[in-house]
Amino acid sequence: MRKLVASFVAILFATGTASAGPILLGGDDLTDHGSRSGTTNIQGWKYIEKGISGMLPQVTRTGPFTHTIVALGSSNPGAGNYNGFGAGGAINSVANVLGLSVLYVDGAAAINQLFTDIANGVVNPQILWISGNGAGNDQDPSEVTAVNSNAAAINNFVNSGGGVMSHGSGNYGWLSTLLPGLLETLGGTSSGHTLTAAGNTAFPGLTNADIGSGPSHSFFSGNFGGLQILGRDGQNRAFLLGGGVGASITEVPEPISMIVFGSLVVGGIVAVRRRMSKAAA
């Protein structure tokens, strides 16, 4: 096995190496534990805003883009409708503050069609935002199933440089399909949530109180691959993960396989990417 370590993302771009998009995962329903005050997102919605704004510079998917964000599992609450409209209101407010466009994809059939449209180039977003299942106007069981059934399409989207941000608990079947070494376990804490050093760097201005504005509902363990722990619950378990996974989330079968473990952690962390190439014997 030959290992090539590049210490800066810029070096990778200069050498023409493909890079996958950013990933931010949470065992949370911070969509339900935030709000808007004037033109400011606070608490859980502040976390979403920090996450989306930090991911965008890391998206390397090729435009032109039809939308900045596709919101999976939420209907459009309408212009100016924020507080009281659940997960849809949360992403609506975040997009409004950041000046971004959102395509709302509500219902299992619409979610399945969305991934067909992305594959065919009809829709070309920068970020897929999975609304979770702990607030109003978010995923119902059929929508969870639809997202999980499109695990391969999510893989393709990330590998093309698109970003994925997700909330929820028990709705990560798509993730376990792509990264079988990463385990989500139901169970959280009502207090004691803390940002890690990586989390503080990834989310400048975000506080422990913001990510702890509501209880966590699940946590992650196992092989995180290129993801870093950004937040821990009150039992010191990883409930916020972020980072990038390179040319493929899943291993490509022999004779040649390549995985790039990336740095691209949300919010401007520039760390080491490791590209591991395995040539056939």
Image (spheres, rainbow, N blue to C red):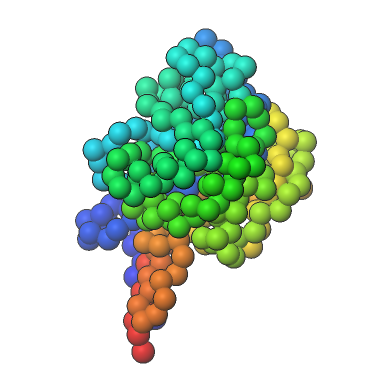
In the image, residue 80 sits, relative to residue 63, either above or below, namely above
Residue 147, image x, y percentages: 53, 47
State the image coordinates of residue 93 (x, y, percent, origin top left). Answer: 49, 21
Q: What residue lies at 45% left-to-right and 61% top-to-bottom?
A: 249
Residue that sits furthest to the front in the current view: 109
Q: Locate the C terminus by quadrant.
A: bottom left
Q: Nearer the viewer, residue 52 or 84?
A: 84
| Res 153 visible | yes
In which quarter of the view is residue 31 placed?
A: top right
Residue drawn at (41%, 30%), measured in percent from left and top? 103
In the picture, measured across the screen, residue 111 lies left or right of residue 125, that is: right
- Residue 68, horizontal then vertical, whole percent: 36, 33
Residue 115 is situated, as x and y percent measured from the top left of the image, at: 41, 46
Q: Is residue 269 visible?
A: no
Quadrant holding the N terminus: bottom left
Q: Nearer the viewer, residue 185 or 66?
A: 66
Locate residue 46: give its quadrant: top right
Q: Residue at x 60, y 27 (%)?
A: 137
Look at 35% across and 78% down and name the residue there. Answer: 256
Q: Nearer the viewer, residue 196 or 189?
A: 189
Farthest top residue in view: 38
Answer above or below: position of 43 versus 139.
above
Left or right position of 132 against 190 = left
Q: Is residue 78 left or right of residue 133?
A: left
